[in-house]
Image (cartoon, rainbow, N blue to C red):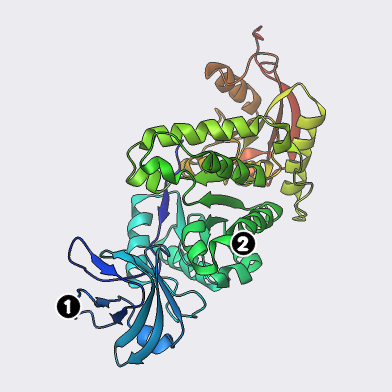
Amino acid sequence: AVAILADLQGPKIRVGKIPEPGIELVAGETLILTVDQSAECGPGRVSIDYPKLAEEASPGDRILMDDGNLEVRVASIEGDDIHCTVVFGGTLKARKGVNLPGVKLTVSAMSAKDRDDLAFAIDLGVDAVALSFVRSAADVLEARSLMEELGRVVPIIAKIEKPEAIANLSEIINVSNGIMVARGDLGVEIGPEEVPLIQKQAIEAANNAGKLVITATQMLDSMIRNPRPTRAEASDVANAVLDGSDAVMLSGETATGAYPAHAVRTMDKIIRSTERAEEYWRDPVEDLELGHTTNSIARAAVACSKSLRETRAIITYTGSGGIARLVSDYRPRVPIFAFTPNAATFQSLALYWGVTPILFHPSSPDGHSIFIDLDKVILRRNLLRPGDRVVITFGFPIKAHKSVNLLKLHEVGESLPSRPTS
């Protein structure tokens, strides 16, 4: 399965239309930013699509453009016009992003466009939604409320890319299904020197809360143009894996890069190489302390797989995916095969570390033949070999939709009438 994550744009501020090939900003010269969208843009004057900028900016504020490559400082404000002095110049092109580090803007986390885009994505059947420029738990709850109105709620990944999100990280993690450390805008907002430590802290916080965490942006940036990554980029991917990321993400490398498929293969090789290292398994989460039975059984399943060294896999049968996600949080050294009758769960589980989702319907509704059914599928798909030891967990009886209450040590094929041999 491949899960599809819809990334909402959020309240991203951008410059307006600028004639090609762009305008040149020169250090020390004046640039006027205007909130008047009808204004003609050209050398010395550029429109901004945030109507409250003239009200909320102040003299002395820094304004960064094009992912922080260009910087101007506010000198004065006259009506709709913000007069700025260029600090770091370069070529400014149309629709480039604008950041105001340190300035608290009153813009809503979800624009009217985001609401339309969310409705479109939900209608298409996406498996999860990434929410951009989250500042507080309320932003996540607003998005979930809108999905409830739309009649379908999918996991929400809160993108951590604002200083306010760092300050409210614990609350955001608690109400989200996961977070994304979105290092592009985050690095512009707080400075690149702060990003590595924030990344490690955010990953650790998500791991300790049992929530999904994705590390993103510029991971193999040079592969937009080159067929091989820099050594620093390879180290960056490896460190994100070692820190505890559930997933690492490519963006420009596959969106506009010259070697999109090769970039994916390269990242895959780095991940696999890193996960073979003993250091990767050194600091597992000991106990999420969630205070419910499912967590205790997930923890016990992983403990069994570690202490019984011949264990080849952990197998879950799940409707919602909850037990598979919890087992994933404990980072077992063996694969997690998550059998589910739910198509939406099947898709969304592809996001989670170590989980191979399998669409599966037991032959009887009461589940009394489930071990036979599981053995047949496992052997038919060559997931494991006859006699392999596995840990199986699910809620029984199945038709009662019980929470997880069963943990079984099982040998593949033992339930079949005529037991196969290796």
Q: Residue at x 70, y 43 (%)?
A: 404
Identify the amino acid type marked 1: Glu
Q: Residue at x 68, y 41 (%)?
A: 327
Q: Which residue is mark 2?
A: 173
For residue 63, above or below residue 176: below
Snapshot quadrant of residue 202: bottom right
* Nearer to me, 339 or 35: 35
Q: Which residue is mark 1?
A: 40
For residue 175, above or below residue 244: below
Of the numbered discs in the image, which one, if any, rests on residue 401? Answer: none
Mark sitting earlier along the chain (1/2)? 1
Residue that protrudes farthest toward the right in the picture: 307
Query: Which of the image's four quarters has the C terminus?
Result: top right
* Nearer to me, 63 or 254: 63
For residue 162, above or below residue 375: below
Q: Position of residue 51 (x, y in %)?
A: 32, 82
Q: Position of residue 401 (x, y in %)?
A: 62, 45
Q: Left or right: where does residue 398 sit relative to residue 140? A: right
Q: Residue at x 62, y 34 (%)?
A: 274
Residue that protrudes farthest toward the top in the picture: 421
Identify the amino acid type marked 2: Ile
Q: Position of residue 378 (x, y in %)?
A: 58, 21
Is label 1 in a helix, a strand or a loop? loop
How packed mark 1 is, by other alpha carbons closer than 10 Å (few <14, some 14-19, many 20 or more), is some
Q: Position of residue 288 (x, y in %)?
A: 75, 52
